[in-house]
Amino acid sequence: MRPPATVGSERLTERMTALISEIRAVVDRGLPPELTAYLVGERLAPHLLVEGDGPDALLTPAQREGDPRRYRQHVLHAEEDGGFSVVSLVWLPGQRTPIHDHVSWCVAGVHQGQESETRYRLVSEGRGSRLVETEHVAGPAGTVAAFAPPGDIHLVRNGCGGTAISIHVYGADVSRLGTSIRRVYRLPAEQER
């Protein structure tokens, strides 16, 4: 059994170490991205909603710290072979992402608070493109979403009055890439009719 690798000075809780082992078992199966994301989501769900600083906590206090300037990413683990990464994202009220897509499959589980997501599809027209809003999703604590490119264009924001925290698992080495975002979209967006 390989020991989990931490990134930087982040220390892992026993629960996070167990979750990483469960994720590794799924990823090592070499399944298609959509199925991998779905199965990783099943492994993540039972670990959400565990609060506090006790022995069952998922995150340390440092891994729950936000940044007043923008949502904060704590890279908790990156597999040595680049097969997956685990991060906690901390969102203070009003913080959001740009409209973006991803470099790989992704699973996001809301650990605390609520995240709101607006999903889009890209429509090509002649020489240009535009975005069309397809769905608004409110994700309360305990909610898990899994997806794989293409068709993963969205904007995520803190959907509550307090701090929101989510755990994201990406099928890429976020510690090396710095982000899971492949492309930021600055196209006109409209609601689907």
Image (cartoon, helix red, strand yellow):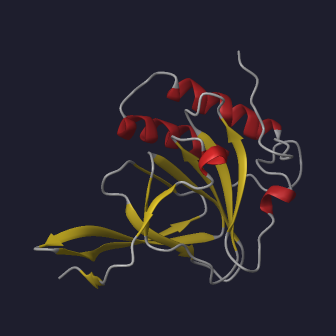
> Residue at position x 39%, y 78% from top?
186
Q: Position of residue 148 (x, y in %)?
A: 38, 48
Taking depth in this image into account, of 58 and 66 the one nearest to the observer is: 66
| Among the 4 quarters of the image, the one containing residue 8 | top right
| Among the 4 quarters of the image, the one containing residue 22 | top right
> Residue at position x 70%, y 77% from top?
92
Q: Is residue 23 above or below residue 147?
A: above
Q: Is residue 11 above or below residue 70?
A: above
> Residue at position x 49%, y 74% from top?
98
Q: Residue furthest left?
A: 126
Q: Residue furthest right?
A: 54
Q: Is residue 101 left or right of residue 112?
A: left
Please indicate, yes or no, whether residue 84 appears anywhere in the rendered image: yes
Please indicate, yes or no, whether residue 48 appears anywhere in the rendered image: no
Q: Position of residue 83 (x, y in %)?
A: 55, 32
Q: How many marks?
A: 0
| Among the 4 quarters of the image, the one containing residue 72 | bottom right
Q: Is residue 91 left or right of residue 143?
A: right
Q: Residue furthest front?
A: 127
Q: Position of residue 111 (x, y in %)?
A: 66, 58
> Residue at position x 74%, y 40% from top?
16
Q: Is residue 30 left or right of residue 142?
A: left
Taking depth in this image into account, of 107 and 44 the one nearest to the observer is: 107
Q: Give the position of the N terminus as an image quadrant.
A: top right
Q: Give the position of the C terminus as an image quadrant.
A: bottom left
Q: Is residue 108 above or below residue 3?
A: below
